[in-house]
């Protein structure tokens, strides 16, 4: 008798979990009959940073970002809906780490500018109307695909000299980014039917986006999203 041991990497497990959740969400949405669809737009300033996972590496502070997107929402009960669409993400982060260039030791300060298009799938849970406002919580997953990246480098040697450089179309960033999305907010329905929304959301990246050997970091951001649904 032969025993086969299957060794699944954390990335494969996360990919399977994502597929299972997406399948469950789509199944619920397809089984919901005679319920309204809403479509709309969003815009969101953000505060973003990167969290390194390498010894002697650290974040170099937060930076501002921005996103805009299209929202598609379908109710399957009065207070629950599935939301999706797409988001254009313009964010990044700053890292600093020790390195050596041309025989000189020092510290690299790297500023990442990242552009991704994200496809979120989330569950939205609302309260009943409270003085004209319905509060909600939202949780789900986001899969994003890179459409651009660049870095700005500042290298400071141990002797104090500094050199700077820019790298456009930087190719050491992963094409796919996976994240957990958690948000809270409220929406107000106008007399004509449109709904105005305000949400504070946390987008927590859980996959490494640096592809160069020995480099690991995960991007995160908070955003304050303004939306209108029709």
Image (spheres, helix red, strand yellow):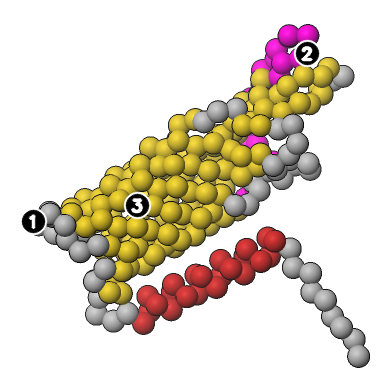
**Left or right side of 90 for 112:** right
Q: Residue at x 62, y 63 (%)?
A: 14
**Left or right side of 219 for 170:** right
Q: Residues within 10 Å of mark 2 (few under 14, many from 20)?
A: few
Residue receiving disc 1: 191
Q: Quadrant of residue 1?
A: bottom right
Please provide percent x and percent y for residue 52.
66, 39
Q: What SS does tag 1 mark?
A: loop
Q: CA distance from mark 3 to mark 1?
A: 24 Å
Q: Quadrant of the C terminus?
A: bottom left
Q: Earlier in the sequence, mark 2 or mark 3?
A: 2
Residue receiving disc 3: 184
Marks 3 & 1, CB-CB < 8 Å contact: no
* Residue 158: numbered disc: 2
Magenta-drawn stretch contains 173: yes
Please provide percent x and percent y for residue 152.
62, 26
Please provide percent x and percent y for residue 37.
27, 68
Q: CA distance from mark 2 to mark 3?
A: 46 Å
Magenta-drawn stretch contains 153: no
Range covered by the magenta-colored residues: 155-175
Q: What SS does tag 3 mark?
A: strand
């Amino acid at each position: 008798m032969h025993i086969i041991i299957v060794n699944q990497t954390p990335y494969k497990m996360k990919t399977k979990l994502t597929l299972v959740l997406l399948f469950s969400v789509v199944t619920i949405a397809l089984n919901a009959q005679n319920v309204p669809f809403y479509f709309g737009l969003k815009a969101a300033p953000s505060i973003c940073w990167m969290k390194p996972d390498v010894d002697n590496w650290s974040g170099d502070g937060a930076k501002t970002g921005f996103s805009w997107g299209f929202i598609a929402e379908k109710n399957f009960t009065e207070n629950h809906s599935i939301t999706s669409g797409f988001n254009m993400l313009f964010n990044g982060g700053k890292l600093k780490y020790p390195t050596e260039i041309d025989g000189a030791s020092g510290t690299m300060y790297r500023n990442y500018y990242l552009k991704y298009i994200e496809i979120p799938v989330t569950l939205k849970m609302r309260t009943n109307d409270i003085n004209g406002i319905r509060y909600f919580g939202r949780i789900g997953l986001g899969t994003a695909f890179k459409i651009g990246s660049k870095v700005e480098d500042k290298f400071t040697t141990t002797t104090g000299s500094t050199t700077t450089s820019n790298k456009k179309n930087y190719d050491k960033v992963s094409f796919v980014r996976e994240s957990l999305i958690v948000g809270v907010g409220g929406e107000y329905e106008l007399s004509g039917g449109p709904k105005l929304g305000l949400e504070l959301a946390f987008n927590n990246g859980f996959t490494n986006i640096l592809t160069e050997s020995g480099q690991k970091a995960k991007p995160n951001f908070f955003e304050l999203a303004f939306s209108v649904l029709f």
